[in-house]
Image (cartoon, grey):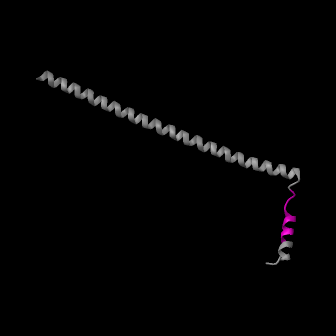
Amino acid sequence: MPVNHQIVYNLQDALNLLPDLNDSVLTQSFSSTTNDELLVVYLSSLMRAVIALHALVDNKASIGRAELEESEEKTEKKEGEKEKDAKEAKAE
């Protein structure tokens, strides 16, 4: 295809509208803004991880409590059965 000069002129005009990235103040401003945004992303990821770990610890603790209660119930049943067997043995 032949070169369309109108498109080339429009591209050159668009490039003239872009900011000068060689300017140190502008570069510093972009860097500062980017760093601020990345800090927010980092802190939110950190908070999300802490909340997930907290939920994991809570879940483990509740499972541990449930297992403890279950084992206590089993030992109480076994003790009750032993006492019942002992009473039946005395009765005989």
> Is 12 covered by the magenta stretch?
yes
- Residue 81 screen position, x and y as percent: 23, 29
The structure residue drawn at horizontal position 31% and vertical position 32%, both measured from the top left corner, is 74
As drawn, the residue found furthest toward the top would be 90
Name the quadrant of the N terminus.
Answer: bottom right
Furthest residue in direction left, as rendered? 92
Residue range corresponding to the magenta coloring: 10-20
- Residue 70 among those drawn in magenta: no
Image-quadrant location for residue 86: top left
Labels in figure, total: 0
Quarter-of-image position of residue 78: top left
Question: Left of 57 or right of it: where is 3?
Answer: right
Left or right of 38, for residue 30: right
Q: Position of residue 40 (x, y in %)?
A: 69, 47
Q: Residue at x 22, y 25 (%)?
A: 83
- Determine the residue located farthest toward the front in the rendered image: 1
Q: Is residue 90 above or below residue 69?
A: above
User: What's the residue at 49%, 38% (across, down)?
Assistant: 58
Q: Quadrant of residue 85?
A: top left
Q: Is residue 19 above or below residue 57?
A: below
Q: Is residue 75 left or right of residue 58?
A: left
**83 left or right of 59 in image:** left
Q: Position of residue 68 (x, y in %)?
A: 39, 32
- At x 86%, y 76%, the residue is 5
Which secondary structure class fits the magenta region best? Answer: helix
Query: Where does the image place residue 23, in percent across and percent down from the top left?
Result: 89, 53
Q: Quadrant of the C terminus?
A: top left
